[in-house]
Amino acid sequence: MSAIRRSAHAVAHWTAAGLVLVDSLTNRPLPASPDDVALLDRLWEWTSVDRLAAAVGRPADEVRSRLARFRDHGLIEDLSSPAPSVARAAVDWRPWGAATAWFHQATRDVGFDADATGQPSRLAAPLMPRPQWPRRDGPRVALDPPPTAGALPETLLARRTWRRFGDAPLTRGDLSALLGLTWAVQAWGWAADDCRLPLKTSPSGGACHSIEVYLLALSVEGLAPGWYHYDADAHALSGVAPADAARVGVYLPGQSSFARASGIFVMTSVFDRVLWKYRSARAYRVILLEAGHLAQTFCLVASWLGLAPFTTAAVAESAIEADLGLVDMRESVLYAAGVGARPSDAPGWAPFPDGTTFRRTPPDWRRSPP
């Protein structure tokens, strides 16, 4: 080690097992002692191991050994080693605070267990907790049933998550509709002479529209299998990297049924677009909300087209970002949606890949007219 200092993203917190130190960018917790915290506290500026050892009155070899543990967990920076790309990108996140970076990293690349059917496993609880209705003691006011006829109600009522798909490829026309009606710039709004903001079919906090979308084409008319980036202004695709259905199990762990889909649309966020306007950590919530808005728009468009859509947050961010050549915290994977043809041998909605049926019963308002 030449010169060292503590990471700007180091966090100390207590667990049932004791004190833990963690760098919010590496998310590798290290059991620690109050002496470890005191040692890190002295590393607020670049210094040498010998100077640090002299300052704390401990042998240099002992201090060097403790610092090696810190370095292995990302808790200190070494001037002789270049900072990783994610650390350089994280500099711009400082206005959002350590909590945002920690949440971002702690919720990436988590394990997703699946049962024998390929479905995410559930907790062994007898029943899902029920909402407590009514929530108020005041008088109940019965409402007329909502409309069910017309293009919009029928599309909303048709929206379901599918996990079984037919063999027909996604047509170029349907692909154009999915991309154009979900992610395309519909117009530019000028807030000032030098500030134009994209207007789309889904809302975005401050009209920042940080979300980009990459298509993993698996069975798309006229497209070779692989990754494509969608240019939302030009309404055009550009090839990025080769990939095929064999990679779906890597990208969407425990969800092998999605390899039969025609295409998977992965949403990323270019964080600088939001940092440009919002310096509060709450902006990170807004980014996640935007991804949800777009996913719902996508599912409605797909349902309107008579396709079989799905969404999933169970994504292996690092694997996708590596194949797309993205730098985490500069542009990161958030969410995935996909679509396929509806299976010809299924009478209707196919929520399970093994053909299991899904029993449905009506809610109270459908059973009891007001």
Image (cartoon, rainbow, N blue to C red):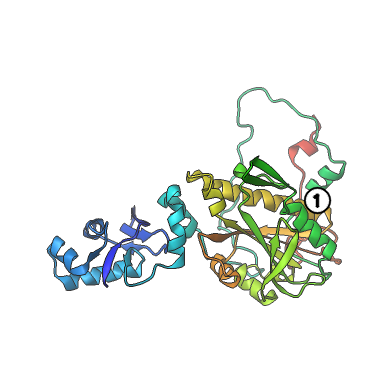
Residue 143 or residue 260, whichever sits in front: 260
Task: Say which quarter of the image contains residue 150.
Answer: top right
State left or right for residue 146 relative to residue 17: right
Q: Is residue 18 visible?
A: no
Where is residue 358? Give x, y as percent.
75, 57
- Give left or right: position of 226 versus 7: right
Vertical placement of 131 versus 254: above or below?
above
Q: Is residue 48 visible?
A: yes
Residue 46 drawn at (x, y percent): 26, 62
Please tell me which residue is depicted at 25% across the width and 55% down the height of the picture.
Answer: 41
Quadrant (top left, top right, bottom left, bottom right) of the C terminus = top right
Instruction: Kindly identify the residue that appears in the image at 38 percent across and 60 percent down.
Output: 23
The residue shown at (80%, 30%) is 144
**Amino acid at pointer 1:** Ala
Label 1 secondary element: helix
| Residue matched to label 1 | 158
Q: Residue at the top extreme? A: 139
Residue 287, image x, y percentages? 58, 49
Is residue 55 toward the left or the right of residue 164 in the image? left
Count of all numbered marks drawn on residues in the image? 1
Classify mark 1: residues with Cα within 10 Å, few (<14), some (14-19) or many (20+): some
